[in-house]
Amino acid sequence: MMSEHRFQTVIARIKMLLPVYKDEDTSHAIAREVDERINKLEKDTNVIDTQKNAAIIAYEYAVENRELIEEHEEDIRELAKALERLASQLKELTRRFHLDAPVSKEE
């Protein structure tokens, strides 16, 4: 969640005032990561077209985000299956040991 507070940074040799994400340290770390990616892309391609590089980096981040979402969804599906198996095993144990019988209140 981004806040209304802003921090100043430089990405791809461009000074920017960006919204803070969590805290300024995290925000600066993210800005450095983006700057490093753009610098690497410029070095690897010998292209210094900031708009094109920004679009490529944005696409790469979108792909990474999509992959993480898909992994998260798969993890949730696997967890749901595990919980279903656990519920089935608990039902079987309850049936096997007659744990569903009413408990007498004799003391």
Image: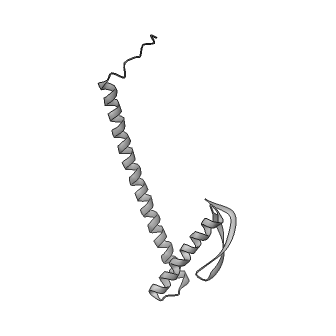
Q: Is residue 81 above or below residue 32?
A: above
Residue 56 place in picture, x, y as percent: 48, 77
Q: Is residue 19 above or below residue 94?
A: below
| Residue furthest front as drawn | 107
Residue 90 place in picture, x, y as percent: 35, 32
Q: Is residue 25 above or below residue 88?
A: below
Look at 57% across and 74% down and name the residue there: 32
| Residue furthest left as drawn | 96
* Quadrant of the image occupied by residue 87: top left
Residue 72 place in picture, x, y as percent: 43, 55
Q: Is residue 35 above or below residue 76?
A: below
**Quadrant assignment for the N terminus:** bottom right
Look at 35% across and 44% down and name the residue there: 81
Residue 84 place in picture, x, y as percent: 36, 39
Image-based side of 102 in relation to 12, left or right:
left
Image-based side of 84 in relation to 17, left or right:
left
Look at 69% across and 68% down and name the residue there: 6
Scheme of colours in the image: one colour
Q: How many marks are shown on the rendered structure?
A: 0
Q: Nearer the viewer, residue 90 or 64?
A: 90
* Quadrant of the image occupied by residue 45: bottom left
| Residue furthest right as drawn | 5
| Residue furthest top as drawn | 106
